[in-house]
Amino acid sequence: MNNSLIGLRQPPYSQCTVGGSTVVVRRQSKGSGCIYFDKSLKETRHGRHIYHNKWCAEITVNNVRYRHRSKSRSACEEFISEMQLKHSIR
């Protein structure tokens, strides 16, 4: 086996740091977006930390990132579908 090719293959996932939290996201094709559960820090009230604890959908179109947070994953899936239709990605 050719030793120069060892280590060139990358796994089908990447780590993203979103709002201070590191999440593992499967790589997708351009414009397909990603959905993850966001547990990042939202704010601090009276010394208590308040976290998002919501589903988050992200899609990048023409180097502009669109993000949508919701309590339900299905709403995030719908958001990505709408953005794909709006920008003629599918």
Image: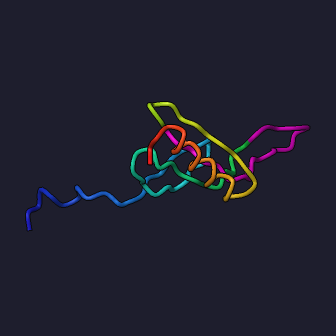
Q: What x and y, as percent, mark residue 83?
A: 56, 42
Q: How many marks?
A: 0
- For this view, does 29 lie left or right of residue 51? left
**Color encoding of the figure:** rainbow
Q: Quadrant of the N terminus?
A: bottom left
Q: Indicate yes or no whether the magenta region holds residue 39.
A: no
Q: Farthest residue in the right direction? A: 46
Q: Indicate yes or no whether the magenta region holds residue 56.
A: yes
Q: Residue at x 75, y 47 (%)?
A: 52
Residue 37 in which image quadrant: bottom right
Q: What x and y, as percent, mark residue 64?
A: 50, 31
Q: What x and y, as percent, mark residue 2?
A: 8, 63
Tell me the magenta residue range. Answer: 42-60
Q: Farthest residue in the left direction? A: 2
Q: Farthest residue in the bottom direction? A: 1
Q: Main secondary structure of the magenta part?
A: strand
Q: What x and y, as percent, mark residue 23?
A: 55, 53
Along the line of sight, the residue nearer the viewer: 44 or 87: 87
Q: Residue at x 46, y 58 (%)?
A: 26
Along the line of sight, the residue nearer the viewer: 38 or 35: 35
Residue 42 in which image quadrant: top right
Q: Residue at x 66, y 43 (%)?
A: 68
Compared to residue 72, the image places residue 49 above or below, namely above
- For this view, does 34 lie left or right of residue 76? left
- For this view, does 57 lie left or right of residue 3? right
Along the line of sight, the residue nearer the viewer: 68 or 10: 68
Residue 77 in which image quadrant: bottom right
Q: Residue at x 67, y 59 (%)?
A: 74
